[in-house]
Amino acid sequence: MKAKKRTKGRNRGEMICISAVVLVLMGVVFYKSSELEKKNAGYEMKIAQLNEEIAQESERAQELEELKEYVNTPEYAGEAAMEKLGMAGEDEILFRAQQ
C-alpha cells in the first residue's frame, strides 16, 4: 500500500510541474501575441501613409504628363521665346525702358 501512495504523490507532483510549464508557456504566448498586435497596428498605419503617398505621386505624375504635353505645343514655344529671348509676336510691339 505504501507503493501506491508514493506513485500517487509522484503523479501529483508531475501534474503540478506540467501545469506550471503550460501556464508559463501560455503567458509567453499571450505576451508575444500582444507585441505582434502592436507591431501590426504600426504596420497598418505605415501602409495607410504609403498609400496616401502613392496617391499624391500618381497625381503629380499626371500633372507632369500634362506639362509634358503642353511643352510640345506651339503656345509654349511662343511664351518661352518671349520670356527668355525677348522676342515678340507678329502683331506685338516691344517697349524697352531706358536705363
Image (cartoon, rainbow, N blue to C red):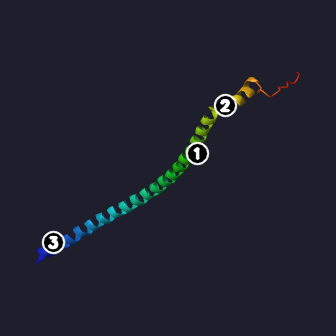
Measure how far apart labels 1 and 2 are at the Cα level: 25 Å
- Rendered residue at 72%/26% (across/down): 81
Along the line of sight, which residue is nearer the eye, 69 or 33?
A: 69
Q: Is residue 50 above or below residue 27?
A: above
Which amino acid, mark 3?
A: Thr
Mark earlier in primary sequence (1, 2): 1
Mark 3, secondary structure of its residue = helix
- Rendered residue at 64%/35% (across/down): 70
Q: Quadrant of the N terminus?
A: bottom left
43 lies left or right of 78? left
Furthest-top residue in this view: 99
**Residue for badge 1:** 59
Q: Position of residue 17 (x, y in %)?
A: 26, 66
**Residue for badge 3:** 7
Q: Label 3: few (<14), some or many (≥20) within 10 Å?
A: few
Which amino acid, mark 2?
A: Pro
Dot label at residue 74: 2
Q: Position of residue 5 (x, y in %)?
A: 16, 75
- Rendered residue at 45%/54% (across/down): 39
Which amino acid, mark 1?
A: Glu
Q: Report which quarter residue 78 is drawn in.
A: top right
Q: Position of residue 72 (x, y in %)?
A: 62, 31
24 lies left or right of 80? left
Q: Position of residue 51 (x, y in %)?
A: 52, 50
Q: Is residue 22 above or below residue 75?
A: below
Q: Nearer the viewer, mark 1 or mark 2?
A: 2
Mark 2, secondary structure of its residue = helix
Q: Are marks 3 and 2 in contact (CB under 8 Å)?
A: no
Q: Is residue 74 above or below residue 62?
A: above
Q: Nearer the viewer, mark 1 or mark 3?
A: 1
Along the line of sight, which residue is nearer the eye, 3 or 32?
A: 32
Measure how far apart labels 1 and 3 are at the Cα level: 77 Å
